[in-house]
Image (tube, helix red, strand yellow):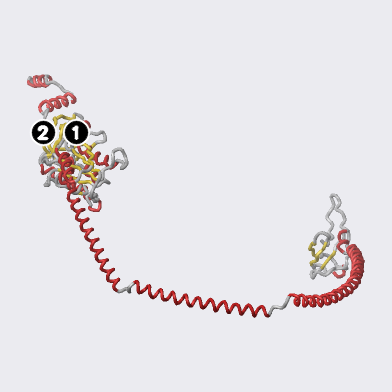
Amino acid sequence: MTEMPQLATAERNVVEYSVSEISQAVKRTLEGNFEHVRVRGEVGRPNYHGSGHLYFTLKDDSASLDGVCWRGTVGRLGLRIEEGMEVVCTGRISSYPRSSRYQIVVESVELAGEGALLKLLEDRRKRLAAEGLFEEERKKDIPFLPEIIGVVTSPTGAVIRDILHRLADRFPRRVILWPVPVQGEGADARVAAAIEGFNALDPGGLVPRPDVLIVARGGGSLEDLWTFNEEPVVRAAAASEIPLISAIGHETDTTLIDFAADRRAPTPTAAAEMAVPVRADLRTQILDIERRTGAAIDRVLRDGARAVEGFARGLPRPDRLLEQANQAVDDQSDRLRNGLANLLAARGAGVERAAAGIRSPAEQVARAGEHVGGFGERLSSAVEARMENARSRYAATDAARRMTGSIRRREGALAERVASLAAMLESLSYERVLERGFAVVRDESGLPVARASDATPGNAIEIQFSDARLGARLDGRADAPPRRTPRRRKGGRDDPQGTLL
């Protein structure tokens, strides 16, 4: 009985904490003891949040640890966290009081060993290959002798000096350098922007557009060359309209840009050799072509001369051809003179014959006078006969004109009589009688009913007035004279006598 109050007093002496106080105490303890740690594990469920923060899980065979990387640090990581990557995260251990979880706040990330890098590289290569970025059909031919060569590399390294020196030895060309960092944070974006910038140049602008591009970097480890495995660089190389030569690292080094480029050079110096031919070799080749061309021309000329000589042997001598021609001309000249003489003689004889057949003018005038005299007599006779015919036709025409007048007067009189009779007929027409209030009654066959005895009770009749026709049926005795229907007296009864209508 005495121990119970003592226990209760001891429990009341223990300090009480709120949930927030406990959470903050745990947070301070974690951050104080694990302020700077490096944790190795496999990435799971990476989530690049819309706010810019990165959330993921680090796990191994028996445990997992939540990780968070704030937005300002994500851009400095140098790589993109993907599912299944084995990484080493550097940061501090902290807690998230709202869910009572501890986590690592990441400050930097690096891949855990070359095996992880190679796995990431192979996975990325397969994915980009599936998109068709490495297809041979996409690759373009390198121009034989470009006027301008664009180089994307570091301005301070030995690569650009090797390229310029090799170009000067082989065939000096104009080189435009686009300086970029070739490793480190943001290097991939700078390299991709350089490739896109060269493609955006105007061929006729102040800075001309190159005919070929060389993307080069010296040798290094897989991590040093990782910039040229990043997707922005690979996609920019694949999309380049200018033929592109990749020269990254040494001959044994392979990066993803090598698959996307139009040509791969084992070294930057080899890239310069691919870009231009050897000027001395070209000169030698041109001289050889010139020599061979001259020899071919001489051979053709000699062959032609021999052919002409052969043809000449088959032709007759020119002086003999002229002898025959001269003889032919003399023969034709003689024949022409004789022909002209014969032609003139024949034409003279024809003229003489024509002159003999021509009468003298006096004879021709006399004969013409006789012909005119006979024609005058015939003309006088014809005129007299014509006048006589005209007089007879005039007399007949006068009689016809008088007859025509008589007929017209007769027609006028007859027309007046016909008009008078028509007016009389119109006045005597039964239709005029109908206009004065009368009507015509017809039976079913359309014949007029002149008397009441001709009408049969019950038959249908038709009554024609001046403006219309009405149908009716007879009712009552046929011999009953029509009577007026008496007026109905006020207050009286109807007349039982029926009507015809």
Residue 191 horizontal/vertical position (percent)? 22, 39
Residue 192 horizontal/vertical position (percent)? 23, 40
User: Residue 56 is drawn in which quadrant?
Assistant: top left
The relative height of residue 25 versus residue 77 in the rendered view (above or below) is: above
SS for callout 1: loop
Residue 302 horizontal/vertical position (percent)? 24, 65
User: Residue 23 is drawn in which quadrant?
Assistant: top left
Please report the residue visible at 15 percent of the width from the left and 25 percent of the height from the top: 22
What is the crowding at mark 1: few (fewer than 14 residues within 10 Å), some, or many (at least 20)?
Answer: some
The relative height of residue 132 versus residue 74 in the rendered view (above or below) is: below
Q: Say which of marks 1 and 2 sits in front.
A: 1
Q: Nearer the viewer, residue 146 or 473?
A: 146
Image quarter hosting the C terminus: bottom right
Three-letter amino acid code at the position of disc 2: Arg
Residue receiving disc 1: 76
Residue 414 horizontal/vertical position (percent)? 91, 67
Q: Considering only order in the chain, which callout, 2 or 1, is on the residue closer to the N terminus?
A: 2
The relative height of residue 498 versus residue 197 in the rendered view (above or below) is: below
Residue receiving disc 2: 38
What number is the disc on residue 338? none
Image quarter hosting the N terminus: top left
